[in-house]
C-alpha cells in the first residue's frame, strides 16, 4: 500500500484548527468567579457552566479575529452547548471502544503546533500564559481531539472503499464536463435525527427555511452559521475553502453549478438533514501531466505505549546498520516493518509529488538513488527510506485515476462522518439543563 495521503495520512483537522486559532484559543478569564452548576449531562459525565463560559470566551475571540458579527449570547451559548455535548459523546465512544491516546502522542502534537507557529515549547507556554491559558489545558484539548480523530479513522475512514467502476464513472463525467471546476463555498447544516418523526422533520425544515429567509434579507452567512448550523465548521462561518467539484457531494456540486459568486442556494435535502450553500468564488482547474516520480521503499516502526520515540529510532538505526553490513533492505522490511507494504519488501512503487506526508517527501527528495535515509519521523511513526530510482513521467491516466480515487474517497468519508456523528449523538443519553 502506498503512503498516499488518505484521510488518515493528512494533517489532522484539529491541528489545522489549533494553528489557525492560536492565540485565539487562549481565553480571557472573568474577573468575577461565578458559582458553577451543571448545564448538561451526557451519559455518565457532565458539562458545567464554567466549562461553557470558557468555551464561549474562546469562540468569541475566534469570531472577532475572523471579523464575524457575533450572534446574541444566548444563541451562541446554545449552539456551543450542543457542540460540547456532541464532542463529549464522541470522546466517550472512543474511550469505550478501546481507543487510548498516550502522553507521547500529545507531546508530539504540541511540538508540531509550536514549530508551525515558529515557537519552541517555552515560547508556546509563554504565549499561552500571557492570555491566561496553560499547557495542561491545551494538552487536554489535544488529547480529546486525538481521541475523536482516531475513532473516525477506525470507524469511518478505514471502511471507505472505492471501486474501479466508480473511478471510471467519475473520469467519464469529468471528460464530459471538460476542465474541472473548483468552488470556494460555505455551508449551513440543519441535521435531522435518525428515524425522525414527520413532525421532527417538519420542525427541522422550518428552521432551515427561517435561516434561508434571513439570508435572503441580507443577514450575514457566517453569523447565521455560528448561530444555527450543526456542521463541524459552523464556528468558522461554515467555510469549506476551495474544493474541486469531484471532492464534494454531487448534491452540492449540482447546486453550486447553478450559482454565481455571492449567491445562496435553495434548501437542499440529504440523508443528514437540510443544507444551505453560499458560493464565494469559483475557478477552473488544469491538470499537471508531467511530473518527477520517485521509486522508493521504506521500513516503518510505529510508536505506542510499548515503543517510545527513542526505541523506534534506535531500532531503525540497528536495522540500517545491518543493511549496510550486507542484509537486504527488502528482507528487513518484511521482517520488521509495521506498514502494509512490508509484504512487498517495503516497496511503495512510483510516488508522485504530494502523494506522501511532507516529512516523508522532504527526506525522500534529499536522497540519491541507492541511498538510505537516517530514521525519519512523521505523524505515523519512524521510517527508513531508500530511493531506488527517479524519472520524469507523463502520468495523465495514472494520475487522473489516483485523483479520482482520492476525490471519491474524500467525498464518501465526509458524508459517512456526518452519519457517524449523528448516530453517536442520537444514541447518547443527554439531559440539557438551564444555563442560567
Image (cartoon, rainbow, N blue to C red):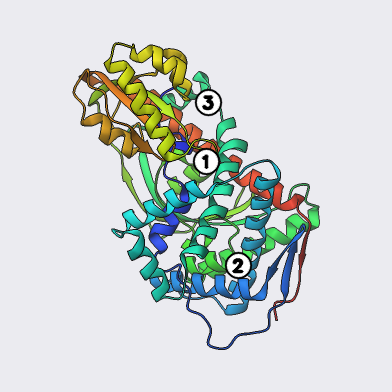
The residue wearing badge 3 is: 162
Q: Is residue 261 above or below residue 324?
A: below
Residue 56 in the image: x percent, y percent? 55, 73
Q: Quadrant of the N terminus?
A: top left
Q: Earlier in the sequence, mark 1 or mark 3?
A: 3
Q: Earlier in the sequence, mark 2 or mark 3?
A: 2
SS at mark 1 in the image: loop
The residue wearing badge 2 is: 80
The residue wearing badge 1 is: 249
Quarter of the rendering containing residue 342: top left
- Name the outermost residue toward the bottom: 32
Q: Nearer the viewer, mark 2 or mark 3?
A: 2
Q: Is residue 34 left or right of residue 115?
A: right
Of 94 and 335, nearer the camera is: 335
Residue 380 in the image: x percent, y percent? 44, 36
Q: How many discs appear?
A: 3
Of 340 and 356, nearer the camera is: 340
- The residue depicted at 51 percent of the width and 45 percent of the height is 252
Residue 22 in the image: x percent, y percent? 39, 64
SS at mark 3 in the image: loop
Residue 271 seen in this snapshot: no
Amino acid at each position: 500500500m502506498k503512503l498516499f495521503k488518505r484521510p488518515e495520512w493528512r494533517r489532522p483537522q484539529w491541528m489545522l484548527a489549533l494553528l489557525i486559532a492560536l492565540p485565539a484559543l487562549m481565553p480571557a478569564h472573568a474577573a468575577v468567579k461565578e458559582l458553577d452548576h451543571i448545564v448538561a449531562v451526557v451519559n455518565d459525565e457532565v458539562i458545567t457552566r464554567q466549562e461553557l463560559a470558557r468555551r464561549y470566551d474562546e469562540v468569541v475571540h475566534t469570531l472577532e479575529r475572523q471579523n464575524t458579527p457575533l450572534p446574541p449570547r444566548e444563541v451562541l451559548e446554545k449552539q456551543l452547548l450542543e457542540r460540547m455535548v456532541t464532542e463529549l459523546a464522541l470522546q466517550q465512544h472512543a474511550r469505550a471502544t478501546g481507543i487510548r491516546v498516550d502522553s507521547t502522542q500529545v507531546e508530539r502534537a504540541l511540538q508540531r503546533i509550536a514549530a508551525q507557529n515558529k515557537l519552541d515549547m517555552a515560547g508556546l507556554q509563554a504565549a499561552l500564559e500571557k492570555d491566561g491559558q496553560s499547557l495542561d489545558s491545551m494538552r487536554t484539548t489535544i488529547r480529546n481531539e486525538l481521541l475523536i480523530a482516531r475513532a473516525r479513522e477506525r470507524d469511518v475512514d478505514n471502511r471507505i472503499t472505492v471501486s474501479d467502476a466508480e473511478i471510471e464513472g467519475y473520469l467519464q463525467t469529468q471528460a464530459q464536463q471538460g476542465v474541472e471546476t473548483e468552488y470556494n463555498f460555505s455551508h449551513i447544516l440543519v441535521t435531522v435525527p435518525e428515524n425522525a418523526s414527520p413532525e421532527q422533520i417538519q420542525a427541522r425544515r422550518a428552521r432551515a427555511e427561517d435561516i434561508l429567509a434571513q439570508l435572503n434579507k441580507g443577514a450575514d452567512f457566517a453569523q447565521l452559521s455560528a448561530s444555527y448550523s450543526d456542521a463541524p465548521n459552523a464556528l468558522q462561518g461554515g467555510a469549506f475553502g476551495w474544493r474541486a467539484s469531484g471532492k464534494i457531494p454531487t448534491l452540492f456540486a449540482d447546486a453550486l453549478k447553478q450559482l454565481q459568486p455571492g449567491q445562496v442556494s435553495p434548501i437542499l435535502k440529504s440523508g443528514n438533514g437540510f443544507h444551505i450553500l453560499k458560493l464565494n468564488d469559483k475557478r477552473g482547474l488544469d491538470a499537471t501531466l508531467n511530473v518527477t516520480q520517485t521509486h522508493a521503499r521504506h521500513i516503518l516502526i510505529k510508536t505506542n505505549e510499548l515503543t517510545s520515540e527513542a526505541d523506534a529510532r534506535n531500532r531503525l538505526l540497528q536495522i540500517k546498520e545491518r543493511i549496510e553490513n550486507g542484509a537486504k533492505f527488502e528482507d528487513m522490511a518484511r521482517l520488521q516493518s509495521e506498514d502494509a507494504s512490508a509484504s512487498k519488501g517495503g516497496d511503495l512503487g512510483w510516488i508522485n509529488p504530494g502523494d506522501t506526508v511532507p516529512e516523508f517527501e522532504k527526506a525522500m527528495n534529499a536522497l540519491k538513488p541507492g541511498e538510505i535515509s537516517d530514521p525519519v519521523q512523521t505523524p505515523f511513526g519512524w521510517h527508513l527510506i531508500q530511493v531506488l530510482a527517479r524519472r520524469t513521467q507523463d502520468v495523465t491516466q495514472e494520475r487522473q485515476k489516483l485523483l479520482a480515487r482520492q476525490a471519491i474517497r474524500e467525498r464518501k468519508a465526509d458524508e459517512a462522518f456526518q452519519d457517524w456523528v449523528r448516530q453517536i449523538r442520537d444514541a447518547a443519553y443527554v439531559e440539557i439543563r438551564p444555563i442560567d
